[in-house]
Amino acid sequence: MPSGAPKPEHKPIAVEAGCGDIPTVSIDNFGLMDDDDIVKVYVKLEGDLEGLTADAVEFKVEQAKYDPTCSMLLLARGKTKMHRLHAEKLRHHVEPDGCKFRISTKNSKLIVTLKKGVPEYWDALRAPNTLPFRRGGGGAPR
C-alpha cells in the first residue's frame, strides 16, 4: 500500500446479539430477483411476521469508507421475535440512497429494493467468502 494512502476502513453495521428481551432469529428463507438496475429481496409475511407494519421494520444499507463494499441490515419486529436479515458484504456495489423497503399487503410480502451501483448480475445476496491470497504456494511446512 502506498505510504500516503489512507488505510482502507470497513465498518460493518453493528448488530446486537439480541434486541432487549425479545429473542432474535435469522431470516433464512427469502427470494431474490435481479432486474436491470435493481435487485429485489422478498420475505414472506407469515407466522410471527403476519400483519407486519412499516413501523415495526428497521432497514439500513451502508457503504464502507474508501471501499465499494456495502452492508445491509433488515430488522422486523414480529409478534414474539425479532427477525433479522443481515449481509455484512453484499454481492456487488449498491447505492445506499436508492435502497428502500415496502410492505405489500396484497401479496403478504416485505420487499427490499437495492439500487445497483454497477449493472452486474446478482445470483446471491451476499458476497462469497474468499480466503486472502498467500504467497509461496501455501503447502504444508516441511
Image (tube, grey):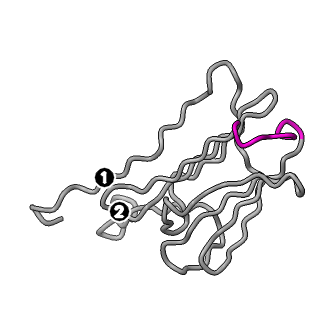
Is 119 situated above or below 138?
A: below
At label 1, the amino acid type is: Glu
The magenta segment: 47-55
The mark found on residue 67 in the picture is 2
In the picture, measured across the screen, residue 82 lies left or right of residue 1, that is right
- Residue at 47% over, 44% down: 13
The mark found on residue 118 in the picture is none
Instruction: Decide which of 93, 54 is in the foreground and name it.
Output: 54
Confirm whether the magenta stretch covers residue 74.
no
Instruction: Decide which of 65, 2 is in the foreground and name it.
Output: 65
- Residue at 62% over, 26% down: 19
Residue farthest toward the top in the current orientation of the protein: 21
Q: Earlier in the sequence, mark 2 or mark 1?
A: 1
Q: Do the CB atoms of the residues marked 2 and 1 lie less than 8 Å apart?
A: yes
Q: What residue is pinned by disc 1?
A: 9
In the picture, measured across the screen, residue 7 lies left or right of residue 57, that is left
Confirm whether the magenta stretch covers residue 53.
yes
Quadrant for the N terminus, please: bottom left
Near mark 2 (Cα within 10 A), the count class, few <14, some 14-19 or many ≥20, is few
Total marks in image: 2
Label 1's element? loop
